[in-house]
Amino acid sequence: MEEREMKHSLAAILAAATAGTVLLGVVSAPTAAAAAPPLPSDVTQLSTPFVDPRGSNFVVTRSTTNTLLIGRRDPVAPVRGVTALGNAGGSLQGDPQGVTIADVGIRVFARDTSNQVVTNLFPNGAPQTGFQVVPGLLVSSDVEVVDLSGAGGQLVRIFARGLDDGAVYTNLLTTAGFTGWRSLGGFTTSEISAALTGNGDAFRVVVRDAGWRVSTTVLSSDGSTTGWAGIGGPEVRGNIALSGGNQAGVQPNEIFLQDAATRTVMTYTFDQPGWRNLGGIANSDIAVLALFDGSVEFLVRGTTNNLYVNRRAPGATNFIGYVNLGGILTGNPGIGATFGRDPAAYAYVRGTNQRLFNKFQRSNFDFDDYIAVSSIPTA
């Protein structure tokens, strides 16, 4: 099905599920809402390795047999990043995500093949606890994860798309457990992107809506939201990348996406609303990283399937232009920063042999060669 046909079909199904329909001139009575249509293929066709955004201390992805693959950065040779991925089992679909909980370990979240949200804890110095279901909701998207500081016992906030209605739901993990799923409403035709706004503990949430344009809401600490609002701009292809607001001095609330018509990379900053065209032709979702020195980088697969990077220096207004990092990618890129070696970062990509590779950026586009980090085929 063509993209525009998919979009119009999704909009029609949404409308029919929420109101009576007209058939041969007769108005039918409203019926119970059917399950929301699944996410379109343009947002699910490529996998994305998830890299720890606040230190590159771990990476998680899914194997071709739907198990969880996880690797931690080698403490003996940290410059090499994650040197091997281990198979942690499970029965997953989509892309897992995770967070590092201070003094505890790495907690991973994913959607399993029964459309449940599951989580697995990898404690520091101890074996994994195994997968456990986060009850109360069936989902039809990956699980978006936002790492919290631990203040007030709040550890992780997660977001997912409801299987039945396509709305955005959220749940909060505290030291006392999960607080329960809550609907934020809306209707998403993409994976969900969320980040702290930099204004206290409020969250910016961004999706592609039924019209294939950007919609956003802000979730405050008291549970209130601003309601979903569109920001105009182009129709979007694929998923929307949102820069994180977790680090002081880092530009928060900026999105990167593909224009559906041209596949050019576009950006929009909520703090100073307005669209900018960054050129290029994207052939993947965009991975964006806010580095600790205040610079911003994004990675994208080009039309030749090579990896490209673009950077905005600290305090600058413009990006400097695309640099070709080579490689042949068969998925979306992932990227994470490293502590203490700004603007060092690790990029992770899936190669043509289904193995995962990393590429270390020492500083300012000084990239090492690609290193294979998995002998296990990745999805």
Image (spheres, rainbow, N blue to C red):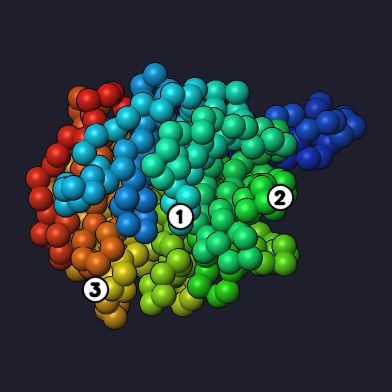
Q: Position of residue 190 (x, y in %)?
A: 52, 43
Q: Residues within 10 Å of mark 1 (few under 14, many from 20)?
A: few
The residue under the point 29% across, 33% down is 85
Q: Residues within 10 Å of mark 2 (few under 14, many from 20)?
A: few
Label 3, on which residue? 313
Give the distance between the C-alpha atoms of the residues marked 2 and 1, in whole angstroms. 22 Å
Tag 1: amino acid:
Asp
Q: Amino acid at mark 3?
A: Ala
Residue labelled with disc 2: 179
Q: Residues within 10 Å of mark 3 (few under 14, many from 20)?
A: some
Dot 3 falls on a residue whose secondary structure is loop
Picture quadrant of residue 343: bottom left
Farthest-out residue, top: 65
Q: Residue at x 21, y 61 (%)?
A: 344
Asked if residue 36 can be seen in this view, the reply is no
Q: Which is in the foreground here, disc 3 or disc 1?
A: 1
Helix, strand or loop at disc 1?
loop
Q: Of the numbered discs in the image, which one, if any, rests on residue 90?
A: none
Identify residue for label 1. Answer: 103
Tell which circle, 2 or 3, labels the residue nearer the N-terminal end.
2
Looking at the image, which residue is at 36% across and 36% down? 70
